[in-house]
Each structure stands twice: as structure tokens, then as C-alpha cells.
Amino acid sequence: DPSQARVTQVTGDTPGVLPVPIIGEVMSDVDAARPFIDSLGAKPLGFAGETFKRPVVTQHTAVGKQTTQATTTGMGSQKMTIGSVTFTKETWGGYLDVSRQDIDWTSPAAWDAILNDLQEQYALQTENAAADAFAAAVTATVENADPTAGPVTLANIIKALYSAASLAYQGGGRLPDTIWASLDMWSTLGPLIETQVSTNQQPGSSSPGSFQGDLLRLPRIVVPSFPTGTLIIGNKRWTEVYEERIGLLTAVLPSVLGVQVAYGGYVAYNTLKAAAFAKVINAA
């Protein structure tokens, strides 16, 4: 009947034929960057044994001014002693049983996402372990302000960093070459640095879009796993990380029509001379 009211059909009337596409890659909130390990450079660990030792001089020879010719008067004489620091290999890894259906029927492939996530979790957990052990090993501290001095200022932090650098040099015999900071110290330093830059002063560089930067012309590395309030200065030669990745391992599980996948590696880390580093802490 031409006089009948017009009928409109919409997508809600045909849900059975309305596709729901899945677009793009699987999004993950894991940051698998390794700022601490990358700042040192992981050394190879491809040698036998559960532990290994790094030799460290604990007492040096002595030299003095000869006060009388053809005699030993005034000249130094002291034996050199060499101790060692022990590194212990740790095994880190994870595994998962995956059904053939989850491998064959998913798009984007769940298999690819699982492999990527295992590698990212390995990187994240080993980074945190090495970084936290380093932060715990550093015991020398310098306060950045008197508790009654009010808000933390960049001037106070810079003064404390120079004092800490002096401690680190005395403890390790090398000038500092790196500053490591926790997340909260990064967020504290950033605005202070930006304020100085806006007035044409250059104490360093910082950006909310990057953990990389510098302070007092030294690389400033942000380590997210560091405890709150951590700001360490020192020479990176005195702490080391070694690594050998096993990588991906897979095995077919025929009885359940599945596959087991694992990812892992070996890591060893230690600080050769803790006195070669110093922390800046808030007095308050």
C-alpha cells in the first residue's frame, strides 16, 4: 500500500551479518627499554661456571721521595694486593603452553604477541633486578638541602651533586661520568632545568617525552625501577652487567594439540667498588 508509513532498516536490525574487524597490532603497556643496563653496556657471559670473579686492587704499591742518595731512605715500599668481587650467574625465564587453536585461529596472531611479551618481560625483569641491586649497593650519601631551607632548588641539587662527585672520585679514583635518577627525581629536576633554560642558562637538558637527558654536562639516565628519591653520580666502570640470552625455545605438545614456548637467559651483575658512587638525598 503506497500510503503505508516508511520503514527504515538500520545496522541494529542485522547484527548477524555485521562484522567486527580487529585492526592493527596488539597494543601493550610494557616498556621493555633497559636504560640502566644500556648505560653500562652488557658484557658477554658465554663462559662456563656458576660464578666468576673480577679482580680489584685493594692495596697499591708505595712511592716516596729519596732523601739520601744511594739509600732507601724516604722511598716507599709496599706490596700490592689484589682482591676480587664475585659475580653469580642468575637464570631468568618464563614459559607458556599455547593451544594450536590459539595459534591458528587468531588474527592478529596471538602467537606473535605471546613471543613479543615473553621477550619484553625478560628484558624488564632483568633490568629491574640489576638496577635495584646497584641502587642498594651505593651507601655514600650527600644531603641536597638543610631541612629548614624550604623547597628543593636546582642550586641545592647542583651543590649536592658536586659534593657527591667529590666523594665518588675519592672512592673510585675516577671522575664521574654518569648520573642515574629515579622517576620522581626526573620529574623534580625537569621543571627546574626547563626554568633555567628559559632564561638562557644551560645546567642540562630534559624532556617529558624522553628519559634521556643530561645534567651538568653528564648523561642523566632515568631508571624507572629505582626507589623514590634516588639520584646517583659516579663512574660507570665500577659497576657491571653480564648477559647471555638463551632466546626462544619451543616444543610440540602432541597429546593436547599444543605448543610450549619459553624465553630466557643468564644474567650476572655486581658493583666492583661501591665507594665510587654517591647518592644525593633530600634532607627533609
Image (cartoon, helix red, strand yellow):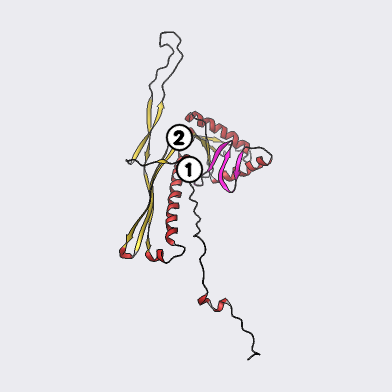
Looking at the image, which residue is at 42% across and 60% down?
Answer: 111
- Assign the C terminus to one quadrant of the image: top right
Is residue 139 inside the magenta stretch? Answer: no
- Judge whether 275 appears above or below 124 on screen: above
Local secondary structure at mark 2 = helix
> In front here: 196 or 153?
196
Q: Is residue 180 left or right of residue 198?
A: left
**Region rendered in magenta:** 203-226
> What amino acid is labelled 2 in the image?
Trp
- Judge whether 105 appears above or below 156 on screen: below
Farthest left residue in view: 255
Q: Is residue 23 left or right of residue 62?
A: right
Q: CA distance from mark 2 to mark 1?
A: 15 Å
| Residue 104 spot, x, y in % from top left | 40, 65
Query: Can residue 133 be seen?
Result: yes
Farthest right residue in view: 199
Looking at the image, which residue is at 35% across and 63% down?
Answer: 258
Local secondary structure at mark 1 = helix
Q: Looking at the image, is mark 2 or mark 1 nearer the viewer?
A: 1
| Residue 241 spot, x, y in % from top left | 42, 40
> What amino acid is labelled 1 in the image?
Asp
**Where is mark 2, residue-wise?**
238
**Where is mark 1, residue-wise?**
38
In contact (CB < 8 Å): disc 2 and disc 1: no
Q: Quadrant of residue 161?
A: top right
- For label 1, count other residues whose C-alpha is less than 10 Å away and answer few (under 14), some (14-19) or many (20+): few
- Assign the N terminus to one quadrant of the image: bottom right
Dominant SS of magenta comes to strand
| Residue 71 spot, x, y in % from top left | 40, 9
Looking at the image, which residue is at 42% across and 50% down?
Answer: 122
Q: Which of pointers 2 and 1 lies earlier in the amino acid sequence?
A: 1
Looking at the image, which residue is at 35% across and 60% down?
Answer: 259
